[in-house]
Image (cartoon, rainbow, N blue to C red):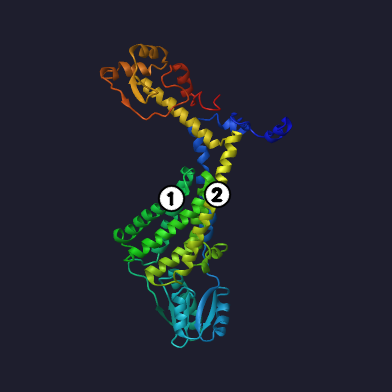
Amino acid sequence: MTGSSRGARTRGAQPVGATPAKAEPGRYRRWYSTLHPSLQLIGLQLWLPLFFIVGFCLCYIAAFHSPHPHDVPVAVVGQSSQLQSQLDSAVPGVLDLTSYRTADEAKEAVVTGHMAVAYDPADRTIYKASAHQYQVAALIPAMLQPVLQAEGVTPTITDLAPLPAHDEYGTVSMYLMLSWCIGGYMVAMFIGLMGAPLRHRTRMAVIVVGAALISLITNVLAGPVIGAVDGHFGTLFVIAWAWIVSIGLAVNGISYFAGRFVALPAMIIFVFLSMPGSGAAYPAWFMPQPFAWLNNVVVGSGITEMLKRVLYGVGPGYGRGLTMMACYAAAGIVLMIVGKRWWENRRIRRIVTGRTTMFNDATTANREFLLAERDDVLARHGLVATETGTINTISDEERDGLRDVDDDTTTGMFFSAPGGLEAETVTTRPVQVVAGPRSAAEPRDRSRLDSDRRDGRHPEYPGSP
């Protein structure tokens, strides 16, 4: 091979065995690295409370500050055109009537949640299902009654599915759904934050086991302990476990791409959008856009429908929830397979180019600062950590030297105080010591350390002046 061709193959590449040149940080990053390491870490995590506040306002407050019914589906046995005209004049845009041939069909539509309420002119009865939507069951009949009374009809109200006494307002399904969503995304979030190098099967095993544990805890607390749920323990355990696994797989796949910011997409998808769009607090007919449309895709709606079917025997059934569960789990597996390779390639590029993140630099600086502080505290108490992982007492000669250079005489006070360390026999003991940037047995410049400590910095961490 000629020299020119050999040079062409290596042009632009790092020679094998060469130390990668570290990228020069920008002005802001250089300034930020001069701050106390602990302050750096705090500042780099403040995005989370800021994001939480913004997300809460844009999703929860925006969705729930003024829920208003719109296009609420109402079943009518027989012809509905005349009643629709009357309702359009009284409450325009609120109720949307649908004709059914028989009263049984109309009542079934109410129980399955396809219709808010049903009205049968033959027996002058409004049928509702409080267990499916308590707010709908309370509000919509109250809107129908004045219009019917204006026509000389005084309807009676029949509840096809009343709520049980231990769940008067039907909120158990909402809070169970929230606990499963939060538990599922948090398990996978911490896996993404701390377990990036782990194999797929290890991460999935943690998700599966964690899902079983969360399902067991939530169902034991909600049922036997609190009494909010009566029975159905086995069914609820399986449903909760399956949903938590699906959510965990989805967040696990996202974590490869989001890194330490995985909480951001996880909370958006499984908390901030899922809760308003779930229909658990208010149905989609009461929600503004885009939350009304999100009812079709967010996990909260699938979980809530399955819970209401188990707990109260209402709702459309399990088909839609199982389909959504499978889709989220499949998406998570695909993202996991693709994301692992993407994460490894990105990591290689960072290693080859010598690039680091501000968070990594701050973590390294804080570790070195804490190690130095540990050595200083031990020295002031007449102890020293050695490279072998033991803590030994300092000899009398070394103590005398420390007294001479200690400006604030703190060490002297510890050594000379009645009942101090020199009055006791201090035995050595093994400890877990993380290797610092210098040998723990090397002598220290006490005056320099004390000066740096008073200024809130340490000369050994990167970026310190």
Whichever of callouts 2 and 1 sits on the residue coming sooner in the sequence is 1
Residue at 33% in and 12% down: 396
Q: Tag 1, which secondary structure?
A: helix
Q: Which mark is residue 187?
A: 1
Location of mark 2 (residue): 339
216 sits left or right of 334 in the view = left
Q: CA distance from mark 2 to mark 1?
A: 18 Å
The answer to whether residue 282 is visible is: no
Position above or below: 202 against 410: below
Residue 289: give x, y in percent of width and height: 57, 63
Q: Mark 1, residues whose alpha carbon is within 10 Å: few (<14), some, or many (≥20)? A: many
Residue at 50% in and 41% down: 45
Nearest the viewer among 233 and 330 is 330
The answer to whether residue 123 is visible is: yes
As drawn, the residue found furthest toward the right would be 4
Q: Amino acid at mark 1?
A: Val
Q: Toward which corner of the image does residue 184 lie, by quadrant?
A: bottom left
Q: Mark 2, residues whose alpha carbon is within 10 Å: few (<14), some, or many (≥20)? A: many
Nearest the viewer among 207 and 422 is 207
